[in-house]
Image: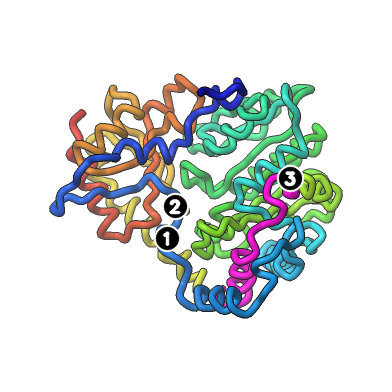
Amino acid sequence: MTSNNPLLASTIAPPVMEARRWIAGKAFGADRPLINVSQAAPVDPPPDQMRQAMAEAVLRQDEVHLYGPDLGLPALRTALADSITRRYQGQVSAKNIAITSGCNQAFCAAIATLAAPGDEVILPVPWYFNHKMWLDMNGIATVPLACGDDLVPDAGDAAALITARTRAIVLVTPNNPTGVEYPPTVIAAFRDLARHHGITLIIDETYRDFHSRPGAPHELFGDPDWDDTVIHLYSFSKSFRLTGHRVGAMATSPARLSEVEKFIDTVTICPAQLGQHAALWGLRNLGDWLEGERRKILVRGDAMRSGFAPLAERGWRLRGCGAYFAYVQHPFDLPSDQLARALVDQCAVLALPGSMFTPEGDAAGASHLRIAFANSDEKGIAEVLKRLATVRP
């Protein structure tokens, strides 16, 4: 039986799940095991000290097993608000924070408060595919915003796309899939544009903790009226390796959170309690550990950049590199969706094609691949680059 909902039926299949099907049933030799650079999430469990704290919570804290507040644990909302205030030198309180079942749910809830079928949301290209999927499922038109050669969107270009039906502009920084970090001036320009037109700026900082700058990546929260325009999204899944526990967050106005509460109560009732307790413990105890994780990711990015020369000599181009990602342009006539499948057989590398992050038929998407290198050490990154250099489609 097929779906009776044409919006859902016309939405693309989940890209990571689709890529996994490319390797189903295939065998890879011990001399050349599969290298999976398709997944943009930690593959390791949380650190041992956090797992011990979680075990203690399971055994000793009865509330971990019960429903909690729709908008999240009060202590976690307060701790995250304090963390944002310190990092951004801003003005954020617990009444601005909702805890969600992962950052994807935070985005879905935000859109649910903003747009209805027939409305429009502007997404820079390449975009994060789950954002596009949610808009498609809800009959909300995605308006592509082309980026320049530096893969940074321009607020002036976005201004030309705004119509009476535009409800929001979405920025992801550090960007997924490109790894590019948007400058504070660019982010501020989008905030000003959104405020001028009475629309919302959604800024998704899922990979914020792996930004190359140790300080605040922007100054949005320094504006005392930030929550009249900005919705900020965050993920504990990447920072504390809590992917399986689904813990994300949203910062916005208290008035909008009253609408978000309706969404969460209907979809999940509340965020999972154990993951929230783990996130709270992490905020209180893992600051130094998280900084160490950030430095590891930065070293891996450096390894990608410094090791890319042999590929560049063969016509490849490193378009973006940061946080978890490298976004590379390949030199072949073969479209990226076909090339990505060929890589599995030719060099035992699983990567996602740029076509998964762009409008259908987009020429740039056909010529790019996303390499999620965060789970590879420097030796592993060197091996990926070595294997790609052997490709002859």
Residue that lies at the very extreme toward the right in this rendered image: 255
Q: Which residues are magenta?
A: 263-287
Residue under pointer 1: 297
Task: Pick whichever of labels 2 and 3 is earlier in the sequence.
Answer: 3
Q: Is residue 90 left or right of residue 274?
A: right
Q: CA distance from mark 2 to mark 3?
A: 33 Å
Residue 26 is left or right of residue 194, and the answer is: left
The residue mark sitting in front, 1 or 3, is 3
What is the secondary structure assignment of the residue under circle 1? helix
Specify the principal SS of the magenta part. helix
What residue does disc 2 label? 324
Residue 360 location (% of width, % of height):
48, 22
Q: Amino acid at mark 1?
A: Ile
Q: Residue at x 65, y 38 (%)?
A: 170
Compared with 26, 287 (above or below) is below
Assess whether mark 3 and mark 1 are in contact (beta carbons under 8 angstroms). Answer: no
The circle drawn on residue 266 is: 3
- Classify 10 Å Cα crowding around label 1: few (below 14), some (14-19), many (20 and above): many
Q: Magenta includes 222?
A: no
Q: Could you say which is closer to the camera, residue 112 or residue 61?
A: 61
Tell me, yes or no, whether the highlighted magenta stretch contains residue 275. yes
- Residue drawn 73% across and 54% down? 251
Label 3: element kind: helix
Alpha carbon of mark 1 to alpha carbon of mark 2: how far? 7 Å
- Amino acid type of disc 3? Thr
**Compared to 279, does 381 lie above or below?**
above
Residue 84 at x, y percent in the picture? 69, 63
Q: Callout 2: few (<14), some (14-19), or many (20+) C-alpha neighbours within 10 Å?
A: many
Q: Which mark is residue 219?
A: none
